[in-house]
Image (cartoon, rainbow, N blue to C red):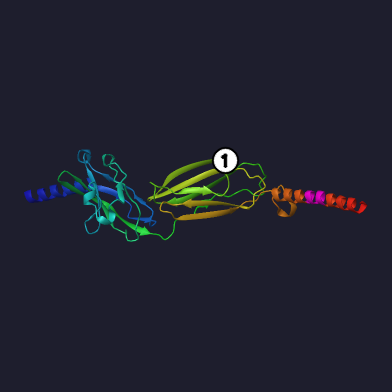
Amino acid sequence: NVSKHKYELLCMLLAITYFQHVADVIPKITALPRSCVVIPCSFKMEEEYVTRLRVLWVTKKGGFMFHTDPVDVLDNFKGRTRLLGNPDEQDCTVEMDNVQTHDNGPFCFRAERENERYSFNNSCVFIIMRASPDKPVMSSLPEDIEPGTRVAVKCSVNHTCSSHPPQITWSVPTARETISHSHMGGGVWETVSAVTFIPTGYEEKDEIVCTAKFWGGKTQENTAFLSIRSKYRLIGLHPIFIWRIFACTYVYEIYFNMTGQIETVRHDL
């Protein structure tokens, strides 16, 4: 039957096209308003179609959240989106900066080459807004630390803005710091600050604070208790205050002795 054969051939062609035009985009990703969000995206196509391929990201109504020609981008997204992936490597990852609370999506990946347009399966993402960023997590600290001993501690925080990771700072002077970034999957990245500090025993505060400043200005912090053997037990005073007490006492004694001698001379006269 000729018509049946044509139908089967058409189904095979459709199946092949469907297989070739498949994208890998996570369906949901969280974002922090005023920060940025990076949407991971990859796709599969025959190599002959990948050359000179233009990556597009469209809204539900068909407007462009991202386009290689900025003129075609919707006004609401102008200057806020850019392509991070390389289409030649079948990477369609896109960044949205200065995220707004209404940037929920869905946003879908499309592609063009000359006058040909391509759509993909599994190519859309919804953005879930969150009011505040993740709180940093600190590694445990040893107890009863001996002054002068090197202490290693880590502070890690998750985020979805890999192009502008959080900046991690510490409340104590650090001797050495190592920063690392790891993709945890699902569009979530982890930034870790590993530091070494040397307590002196003269610390005014018995705590160490790790602060993460996120792209866009929001911050989160975590605090850990420092258990350090103090070198000075005198009513918990800092050494400089103890020195001032002794200095004042010494000066007072000299002054008292001098005034006493002056009074004695006056009486003798």
Say which element carries label 1.
loop
Between residues 261 and 196, which one lies in front from this camera angle?
261
Residue shown at 78% from the left, 49% from the top? 251
Query: 58 or 220: nearer the eye?
Result: 220
In the displayed image of the protein, which residue is found farthest to the right?
268
Name which residue lies at 37% across and 59% down: 129
Characterize the magenta stretch by its predominant secondary structure: helix
Left or right position of 33 against 255: left
Provide the residue span drawn in magenta.
Answer: 249-255
- Residue 253 belongs to magenta span: yes
Q: Is residue 169 left or right of residue 245?
A: left
Can residue 268 be seen here? The reply is yes
Q: Is residue 134 visible from the viewing direction of this image? A: no
Image point (75%, 48%), residue name: 247
The residue singled out by tag 1 in the image is 175
Depth check, front residue: 199 or 19: 199
Residue 36 placed where, x, y %?
37, 52
Specify whether residue 131 is painted magenta.
no
